[in-house]
């Protein structure tokens, strides 16, 4: 069993440099600052908020993102995450959870079981194909006790991962199919601007946010007024961590996109994001996040130095860091020494060197590192890096461990 999982609480009150290596370290002051900034933005704009729990899969972090019940919705990517958040339902600070993958048959019994045991939780489903309606109607015929599933229709506004393009002829047909089915209830339209991670300037990110807003409003206009629709509401959900950083532009985009003119239902605008509490080098690459806004670091240890090639070996490789990249060189960057990064990796080995430079340039490795020295690394993609670790060590301003969080694992 993982050593940290057995002994993590014994490190509370000790400096982060005492931790076993590799370890994942979270700066709580930085987490709180990042979270509070987005919460303030959505509050000022009068928007609803749905944090994604996929990055730091833990009760403690989710409480912070929900502001302890000020916001009462989440989105999750795994059944494990949905089961993990159930204590927050019992605490009375969470009402609603969206299962963020387009629904598939084997997930339905698990979701039904959660609903049965936690009846105060509303579970939303994601759909983007008429086949999903077939599946849900078939399930409903075998389970007459289940109420119609509330569904988001997923839109593809440029990521090309999941969803229907707003301009596609498939979208109005799917809206009609949903509105004609007794197995589902149209909750709203959802898009995720994952391609915003490739942006490198604020104006580029603002453009992507505008595409999101235009996409969901186009979809709403396919809804037809029905008898008894008075007071009906639809939720349009936009977001990603980069576009959340420019969320203050939402109201302008709503106005310039024609607003909800011609729509005969009430429209609620919701923002979703997941990576924003921690941030990472990919977010720094967008130009919207500063290096000091990264709350997550990996503690590693120098295992050897190689003067002949001006490199050092650390005990954090692919399974501790991931092989994600960005505009910033390497698979991880040494905190406080940005000229040194992880230039190569294998499963458990990481190689520190100068990315994109002649190895003869810069500081000599034997002057920079010694065997047994512990180094902190910024990671490229916090979501994937965090998934590799069994415990998160939460530190204060002085890098002293004050809490340990055990994340939800698996699918």
Image (cartoon, helix red, strand yellow):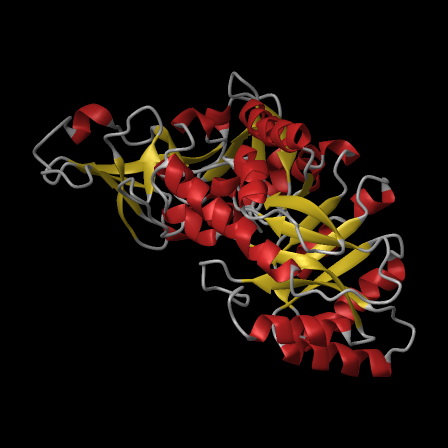
Tell me if residue 7 can be seen. yes
Q: Nearer the viewer, residue 212 or 13?
A: 212
Tell me if residue 379 can be seen. no
Give residue 295's position: percent from left, percent from top. 50, 31
Query: Is 191 above or below relative to 24?
Result: below
Query: Is 115 above or below relative to 359?
Result: below
Residue ID at (74%, 46%): 73
Q: Nearer the viewer, residue 181 or 149?
A: 181
Residue ID at (63%, 50%): 237
Left or right relative to 348: residue 53: right
Give residue 75's position: percent from left, percent from top. 66, 51
Tell me where residue 200 sits by quadrant. Answer: top left
Give residue 90's position: percent from left, percent from top. 86, 45
Query: Is 271 above or below relative to 178?
Result: above
Tell me where residue 49 sits by quadrant. Answer: top right
Q: Nearer the viewer, residue 396 or 8?
A: 396
Residue ID at (62%, 56%): 190
Tell me where residue 104 sits by quadrant. Answer: bottom right
Left or right relative to 26: residue 180: right
Residue ID at (58%, 27%): 37
């Amino acid at each position: 069993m993982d050593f940290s999982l057995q002994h993590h609480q014994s490190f509370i009150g000790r400096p982060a440099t005492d931790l076993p290596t590799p370890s994942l370290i979270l700066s709580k002051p930085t987490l709180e600052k990042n979270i509070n900034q987005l919460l303030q933005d959505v509050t000022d704009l009068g928007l609803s908020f749905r944090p994604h729990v996929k990055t730091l899969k833990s009760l403690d972090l989710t409480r912070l993102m929900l502001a302890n019940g000020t916001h009462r919705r989440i989105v999750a990517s795994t059944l494990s995450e949905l089961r993990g958040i159930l204590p927050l339902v019992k605490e009375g600070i969470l009402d609603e959870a969206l299962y963020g993958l387009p629904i598939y048959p084997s997930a339905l019994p698990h979701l039904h079981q959660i609903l049965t045991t936690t009846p105060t939780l509303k579970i939303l489903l994601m759909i983007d194909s008429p086949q999903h309606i077939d599946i849900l109607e078939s399930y409903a015929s075998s389970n007459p006790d289940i109420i119609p599933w509330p569904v988001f229709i997923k839109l593809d506004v440029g990521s090309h991962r999941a969803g229907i393009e707003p301009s596609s002829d498939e979208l109005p047909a799917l809206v009609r199919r949903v509105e004609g089915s007794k197995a589902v209830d149209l909750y709203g339209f959802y898009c995720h601007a994952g391609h915003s991670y490739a942006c490198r300037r604020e104006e580029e990110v603002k453009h992507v946010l505008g595409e999101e807003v235009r996409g969901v409003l186009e979809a709403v206009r396919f809804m037809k007024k029905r008898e008894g629709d008075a007071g009906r509401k639809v939720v349009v959900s936009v977001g990603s961590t980069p576009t959340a950083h420019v969320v203050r532009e939402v109201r302008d985009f709503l106005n310039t996109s024609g607003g909800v003119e011609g729509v005969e239902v009430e429209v609620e605008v919701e923002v979703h994001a997941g990576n924003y509490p921690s941030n990472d080098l990919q977010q720094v690459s967008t130009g919207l996040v500063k290096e000091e806004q990264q709350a997550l670091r990996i503690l590693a240890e120098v295992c050897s130095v190689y003067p002949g090639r001006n490199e050092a070996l650390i005990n954090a490789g692919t399974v501790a860091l991931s092989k994600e990249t960005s505009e910033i060189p390497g698979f991880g960057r040494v905190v406080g020494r940005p000229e040194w990064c992880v230039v190569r990796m294998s499963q458990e080995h990481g190689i520190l060197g100068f990315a994109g430079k002649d190895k003869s340039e810069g500081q000599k490795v034997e002057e920079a590192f010694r065997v047994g020295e512990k180094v902190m690394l910024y990671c490229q993609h916090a979501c994937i890096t965090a998934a590799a670790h069994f415990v998160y060590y939460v530190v204060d301003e002085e890098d002293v461990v004050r809490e340990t969080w055990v994340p939800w694992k698996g699918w």
